Amino acid sequence: MKKTYLIANWKMQLLNKEAEDLSFEILNKVKKIIPSTRNKNLEIILCPSFTSINSVNKIIQSFFKNKSLSAGAVKGSQGAKAEQVKLGAQNVFYQKKGSYTGEISATQLKELGVKYIILGHSERRKYLNEKDEDVNKKIIITLKNNLIPIVCVGETLEQRQNNKTDLVLSKQISKAVENVKLKNNQKIIIAYEPIWVIGTGQAVNPKQAEQSTQIIYKTLQKYFTEKIIKNNISIIYGGSVDSENINNFLKMDLIQGVLVGNASLSSEKFIKIIKKIKNNKRN
């Protein structure tokens, strides 16, 4: 059975202390609602800003290693474990090192405990002019460092209204995985995020999401074997996900999790989503 992924994208919303507090709140509540640390079917991934990665990693590791948090960090840890909670980043540069002011490398992120990296998010494509070719390079460097890329794809409202959803998704996926070869232990997560619903509070109709994930799946079949797709690639949904609609998406055969934005900034809202996933028959 494939894992169900619950990914929190905190974007550029939290100061370091806020990220620490939120991390501790989430982990402490996870300990209470999922007492078993061997739940292999659910993976929770926290993706803070670069400035908070080290702090959040220390909190995760303190829970994982059954140790109290160090002085100066959030107080109150009593040795909870969190094997299913992992650390993610929101971007990476495609060079190993060099004179690239303002960028961050996969090796630097890996050193800080990062396991997953969000790539090609629509906000980076829109505001920072990130291209499909850039995403492809970032996927390759991420995999080279044995990290897992979370690759975002999605269409605008205008593209959907002009019946170009299939074309847009197929192109984004094709460009993203060009020359990508997956080894047995390497994984890719594809996040379908319809741009026109991100941040609106209104998720896409699950049937529309299912149709789009089928397009993604069919495109992947052009580049990978069925075995690789089954064992190494997961498709998830993102865009105004909350506890009320989460199970509607997990009912879809191809959707193996969600990427959460606004609802992940509240421990209460995020835990409600975790509870819904925990009680879902898939898990």
Image: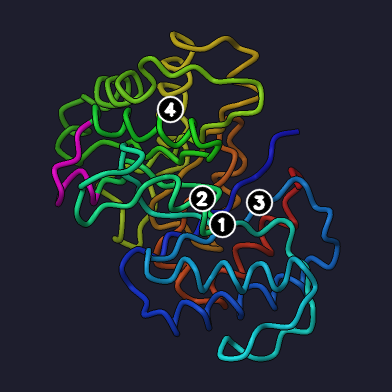
Task: Report the span colored magenta.
Answer: 123-131
Cα–Cα gap, marks 2 and 1: 5 Å
Tell me which residue sits at (72%, 84%) in the image. 77
As shown in the figure, which amino acid type bears the numbered disc 2?
Answer: Lys
Q: Do the numbered discs 2 and 1 sit on residues whose CB atoms are within 8 Å? A: yes
As shown in the figure, which amino acid type bears the numbered disc 1?
Answer: Gly
Task: Name the side, left or right, on which 209 lies relative to 41.
Answer: left
Tell me which residue sits at (54%, 73%) in the image. 269
* Mark before the other along the chain sequence, 3 or 4: 3
Q: Is residue 223 magenta?
A: no
As shown in the figure, which amino acid type bears the numbered disc 3?
Answer: Glu
* Residue 170 drawn above or below residue 260: above
- The answer to which image quadrant residue 38 occupies is bottom right
In front: label 2 or label 3 = 2
Nearer to me, 58 or 165? 58
Q: Which residue is mark 4?
A: 211
As shown in the figure, which amino acid type bears the numbered disc 4?
Answer: Gln
Tell me which residue sits at (77%, 47%) in the image. 40
Residue 20 x, y percent position in the rendering:
51, 79
Please tell me how crowded label 2 is: few (under 14), some (14-19), or many (20+) other residues with Cα within 10 Å.
some
- Outermost residue, front side: 98
In front: label 4 or label 2 = 2
In front: label 3 or label 1 = 1
Nearer to me, 50 or 265? 50
Q: Which residue is mark 1?
A: 113
Residue 210 x, y percent position in the rendering:
48, 32
Cα–Cα gap, marks 3 and 1: 16 Å
Cα–Cα gap, marks 2 and 3: 18 Å
Please tell me how crowded label 1 is: few (under 14), some (14-19), or many (20+) other residues with Cα within 10 Å.
some
